[in-house]
Image (spheres, grey):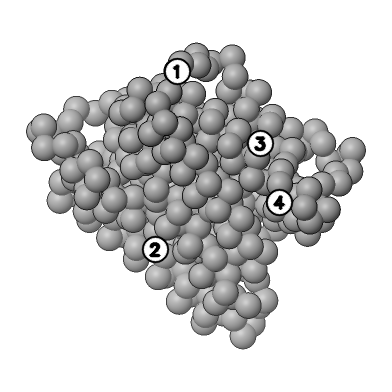
Amino acid sequence: MRSTGYLYVLCAAALWALIGPLSKQVIALGVAPLEAAFWRSAIGWSFFAVHALSTGAWRLERKDAPAIASFGIIGVSTLFGAYILSISMVGAAMASVLLYTAPAWVAVLAWLTLGEQMHAHKLIALCMTLLGVACVSLGPAIVSGQGLGAVNLPGILLGLLSGFSYATYYIFGKRYLGRYATPTLFLYALPVGCLGLLPFVTFTPKSEEAWLFLTLLAVTTTYGAYSVYYAGLRRLSATRTAIVATLEPVLAAGLAYVWWDERFDLMGYAGSALILAAVLCTILGGSRKSGREATI
């Protein structure tokens, strides 16, 4: 059960690694960042809606509506908007790593709201993750072979904001996955997210190629990634899921290098290695404790 959970989360990380390169491609085709975030939500919702209606998973208890609406604003409007703006300002590689301050937020929120214990291997992995994020953020990046990029404070702050909003996925999922299927949650959360983005979006005509990449962005990084991610979250703890998913920025950095020639300096690559080590620490630490506890 747990090994299957890891596979689901790693698959989600691979799909999410496409956000940066695909978003940069969409922006290069003339779509503004926040409009791209809007269509990522809207097109992704259409797939969840078909899934939910075809399986009969559309019923929602009225008492849960405010929580899911709040998640739509924080987990969709804020995350999608802040993340793609950060990508446009600091590049796909750095934005994806800044997103992964999320495990630190998750560890604290899970401890406060879910009663998850803070074992030694979790603390070590969190420290390694945060140090890795610091290395990547503070080390200058070489973007598209144009030289050392200056520190972009708004882009970094938006990346950190995306990390905080991303953390709500773990806490929200643990509270509601036991009662609702994944398509049910996103059937209602994504339209709220679209409405939250709508006042900031200016719609412009788009080419067929732009629509193709917007659809690809939505199908892979919204419908596909969240479907397999929440399947993994059903099998793993919130903190462990968060740290295992930090493979995403490493994969995203590789894709950004191949697709857009974005590169880190030595400190950035050291930070990426620390993030990978944190993932291994989480998995190995969990396997040692599996005989004593079902979930951590």
Mark 4 lies on residue: 51
Mark 3 lies on residue: 190
Image location of residue 289, percent across then percent down: 56, 79
Image location of residue 219, percent across then percent down: 53, 47
Q: Is residue 160 left or right of residue 8?
A: left
Graded by Cα atoms within 10 Å as few (under 14), some (14 to 19) or many (20 or more), the crowding at tag 3 reads many
Q: Considering the numbered disc 3 on the image, is that residue within a helix, a strand or a loop? A: helix
On residue 278, which mark appears? 2
Looking at this rendering, what residue extends furthest in the right direction?
Answer: 62
Image location of residue 200, percent across then percent down: 53, 16
Q: Are marks 3 and 4 in contact (CB under 8 Å)?
A: no
Q: Are marks 1 and 4 in contact (CB under 8 Å)?
A: no
Upstream in the sequence, badge 3 or badge 2?
3
On residue 205, which mark appears? 1
Q: Are marks 3 and 2 in contact (CB under 8 Å)?
A: no
For marks 2 and 1, give the CA distance: 44 Å
Upstream in the sequence, badge 3 or badge 1?
3
Front residue of 176/217: it is 217
Quadrant of the image containing the N terminus: bottom right
Location of residue 291 with respect to 179 vertically, above or below: below
Residue at 24% across, 28% down: 151
Location of residue 227 with respect to 81 vertically, above or below: below
Q: Considering the numbered disc 1 on the image, is that residue within a helix, a strand or a loop? A: loop
In which quarter of the view is residue 65 placed? top right
Q: Is residue 163 visible?
A: no
Image location of residue 268, percent across then percent down: 22, 48
